[in-house]
Image (spheres, rainbow, N blue to C red):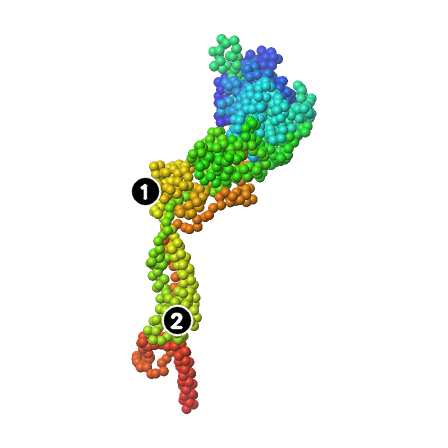
Amino acid sequence: MEVALRANRGLVFMRRMPCLLLGTCLWLTMGIIADAAGNSSSNSSSLPPSLRPSAVTIGSLFTRDSVIGKAVRPAIQAAIDDVNFDLSVLAGTQLKLLDYDTNCSGFLGTVEALQLMENDVVVAIGPQSSGIAHVISHVVNELHVPLLSFGATDPTLSPLQYPYFIRTTQSDSFQMYAIADLVERYEWREVIAIFVDDDYGRGGVSVLGDALAKKRSKISYKAAFTPGAPEIAIKELLIGVNNMESRVYVVHVNPDSGLEIFRIANNLGMMAAGYVWIVTDWLPSALDLSETVDADMMNLLQGVIALRHYTPDTSKKKSFLSRWKSLKFTTTATPNSYALYAYDSVWLAARALDTFLSEGGNISFSDDAKLIGLNRSRLSLSTLRVFDGGTRLLQILLTMNFTGLSGEIQFDPDRDLIHPAMDVLNIGGTGTRRIGYWSNYSGLSVVPPETLYDKPPNRSASSQNLHDVIWPGEMTSKPRGWVFPNNGKPLQIGVPNRVSYKQYVAKDKNPPGVKGFCIDIFEAALKLLPYPVPHEYILFGDGKGNPIYSDLVYGVAQNKFDAAVGDITIVTNRTKIVDFTQPYMESGLVVVVPVKEEKSSPWAFLKPFTVPMWCVTGAFFLFVGFVVWILEHRLNEEFRGSPRRQLITIFWFSFSTMFFSHRENTVSTLGRLVLIIWLFVVLIINSSYTASLTSILTVQQLTSGIEGIDSLISSSDRIGIQEGSFARNYLIDELNIVESRLVTLKSQEDYAIALEKGSKGGGVSAIVDELPYIDIFLASTNCAFRTVGQEFTRSGWGFAFQRDSPLAVDLSTAILQLSENGELQRIHDKWLTQTQCSAQVDESEDNRLSLSSFWGLFLICGIACFLALTCFCCKIFLQYRRFSPETGEPEIEIEPASARRPVRTTSFKDLMGFVDKKEAEIKHMLKRKSSEEKRQANQCSDEHSLHSSA
C-alpha cells in the first residue's frame, strides 16, 4: 500500500512539474519576503521535493486557565523548544506553534479551532475537552489535518467516525474497567455514578455500566449534574443519593469543579465510615500540580480511592521533572500526567513530519470545493483549506513507535496507546499513597505493570491484589457498600396469610403479628447479621383462603414489598424477577392417594415367589439331594440299603435341608462341600421368603390404579391441588394436564373428604402437593392415605428479595450458619415434629421374588455340584481301571498275522456293580490284587533264572 501511495504521489508530481517550475521563478523574487513573514505553507507549496521548508506550523487548543491547561501549556512549549534544538529531528525545518485558548467554552472553542485552521496548520494538538473534540473532529476530517488530543478521553470518540482524531492519552474506557475490577475485588454489587452531564461524563459512565455488567454488578443510579451547576444543585443531588441503598460512589467530573462535591459531601456527613468514594483521574490531575496540598482540602478527601494514569519512572521523565520549574509559562510546582501526554504529542507530530518530509512529502494546501460556495458568508469559511498530505501524514502518525515521557508511544489497531495502565491511590493523612496498579493486561497487582508484560496474563481472583486501604472514617475493614435506604421506613416484608398448614406461617395477635416455622427461621437468620435490619411484616391475602404465591412474588418485583417471607417455593419463573436466598427447607411435588387394607388370602403363602422361582427351587432341592446321595453312597451306611429305602432317603434329605433338620451325616469331603454351599443358598431363600411374606400380609392396597405421576397423567381422573400453590401452573404448563381436571382445595379437611369420595363421587383420585405439606397431612389422618411414586420435582423454600439485593446474599450465608450449628433443626423440631407413616404402599406383585434375583446363587450351587460329580467320576474311573475280578472271566484271543493280543470285554452291569460296592471293599480288593501281582512277578523271575542256569 505504501509503494502504491508513493507511485501515485510521483505521478501527481510529474503532472505538477510545469507549475512547480513556474513557482520556482516566483520564489526567486518573492521567497525572501515570504520567508521573513514565516509563511511556511506558501513556501513549501512551491518548493521542489528535494528541499525542505524552513518552518512548519502546528496549532494547539486548550483552556489556559484550567487545571489541565496550566500544566499543558509549559509542556507543549518545552516540547517545541526541544524539537527545534534537536538537529536529528526536522533538520533544517523549524517547528512553529500557534496557541489558541478555548476558554472552557464549547462555542468559543469551536470558533478558536476554525481560526486555527485558517492558518494552514499541518497538525493540531488538543483539545482537552471531549465536547470540543467532537466538534473539531468534523472540521479536521474535512480539512485532512490530524488532531492529536492529549485530554479528550471520551470513549465515544471513535476512529470510525473521526478518522483524523488520534488520542495520545488513555481512553476513559480503561479506567472504567479498572473501577469495575475494584468493585469486583471488594464484592460490591451496586454503585452510584456521580458525573457531569456532558460528552465526557456520559461517555465514561456508559462504559462503566458495561464493565460492571460483565462483573455481575450494576450502576443502581446515575446522578448527573450540568456543567457549572450551582452549589445548591449539587447539594440536592448528594442528599438524594444519600437516601439510597448503595454507599459506593464513583465520581467522574471535571477537575476544576470536582472538589466542590467533596466539600458538600463532607458537610452532609457522607465522608464518614461506611461510605466508599472512587474517583477517576481528574482528582490526581489536580493534586499533582502542587508539592504541598492544602490541609483543609486533604481533610475533605480522607479515605478516597483515586485512579491516575500510570507513567513509568524513566530517566527521561526524571530529567524533565527536574527542569519543570524553569520552563516558560510554568505556574505549577509539578506537572500532571496530561502535561506528559501533551509533551509526547508534540514529539509525535515532529517525528511524523520528519518521516513525511524524508519521504518527499510536500506541505501544500488546496481549496475545499465544498467551501467555495460559502464566500457570501461573513465567516470567511472559504479560507479554510485542505492539507494535501494529510492522509499520508495520518498513516505515518499511526505507525510511529518511540519512548516518550509517558512511556511507549505506539498505537494498537483500535488507535489506543498500547499497555494502558493506572495507579491505584488511597488518599490519607496529608497526601496520597499508592496501594497498587491496574493494567489492561493482568488487572490489579502490587507490582509495576511493565514487570508483568513478559509473563502470561493472569486474571484469576487470587492474583488480583492491592495493599490495605484506609477507608473514610479511618476504617481498615472493608465497608459493606450498602445500607437500608435512609427514608425513615423499615423493610416492608410481605407474608402470606394462610388458612391451612399454619405451622409454617400464620397470623398472630402478638407482635410482630405473624408466627410459624418460616418466621422463626427468618428472625434467627437476621440475628446472625452484623447489622440491624429494621422491618415490619405485612400480611398478604384476605384470610379466607390461601393467597396466590406468584402474586406475592410479583409484588416484590414491582416494589410493593421489599421482601417476601414464608413457605415460598423457588421455581424458575420466580427466579427471573426476584432473588432468592439459600433454600432453608427441601421441597418437591408428590402424589397422594387413598389406600385400604388388603384381605388375607388362604393361598397368600405362595405369593412371595413367582412360579418359575418355585419350580427352580424345588428342582434344586431334588438335584442337590441326588448329588449328595451319589457322593455319600459308597462311604455312608445311612445312604445305602434297598432301592426303596435309598429313594426315600434322597427325598427326605433334600427337603429336610430347608429347615436344617436333616438327620443323615455326610462323611465324604465332596458331599460336605456341596452341602455347605446348598445350606447357604437355603438360608438366603428362607430369609427372603420370610421378608416377602411379611410384607404381603401387612400391605395396603390402592383404591385406584394410580401408581405415580405417569399413571396420573395418562388417566382422566380429577386431581386435587392446594389453593395458591404453584402446582396448578406446573401441571398445566409443564405436564399438559387439562385444567378442568384440577380441583382447588383449601384445607387439610378438604383433602381428606375429596380423597374419600374419589373422582367418581365428586372428589379426587389423587392430590398433588409439596412434600412438607403432605407430611403434616398424612400424620393428621393417621396414615389413612399414602404417597405413591417418587418426588417428580426437586426444589426448596427460600425468602424472596428484589433483584440484586445484597440482603439476599447475607441471609443466604446466615441460613447456612443456622444449618451448621443445628439451630435450623431445632426450629424444625419445634414446629413440625409429627408421627411418621412407616407403612409402605405397594402391590403384592411388586413384593414377589423372581428367579432374576437368585439365579447367581443357583449358578454357584450348580457349579459346585458339577465339580463334585466330576471329581467323583474321575476317582471311580481310575479305580475301575485298576480293578481285576477274582473269578475267571472269558478271554477272547484274536490272532493277527503278526501277533496275538487278548481283549477283555466289560458289561454296563459290571460297572454299576463296581460303583455300588463299598469303598472299603474296593480298597481291600485292590490291595489283594496288588499283592498277587507282586507274587506272580516273583515266580516268573525265579523261573527265568532257572531257565538261564540250565
Disc 1, disc 2: CB below 8 Å?
no
Res 511 seen here: yes
- Image-quadrant location for residue 427: top right
Residue tagged 2: 631
Res 152 seen here: no
Label disc, if present, on residue 760 of the rendered structure: 1
Label disc, if present, on residue 120 of the rendered structure: none
Q: Amino acid at mark 1?
A: Lys
For the residue pair 12 and 696, the one nearer the viewer reads as 696
User: Residue sitting at 55 percent across and 37 percent down?
Assistant: 526
Residue 887, compared with residue 33, is above or below; it is: below
Residue 882, compared with residue 333, is above or below; it is: below
Q: Residue furthest front?
A: 509
Q: Position of residue 447 (x, y in %)?
A: 62, 35
SS at mark 1 in the image: loop
The CA distance from mark 1 to mark 2 is: 66 Å
Q: Position of residue 896 (x, y in %)?
A: 30, 79
User: Residue sitting at 35 percent across and 64 percent down?
Assistant: 619
User: Residue sitting at 35 percent across and 55 percent down?
Assistant: 600
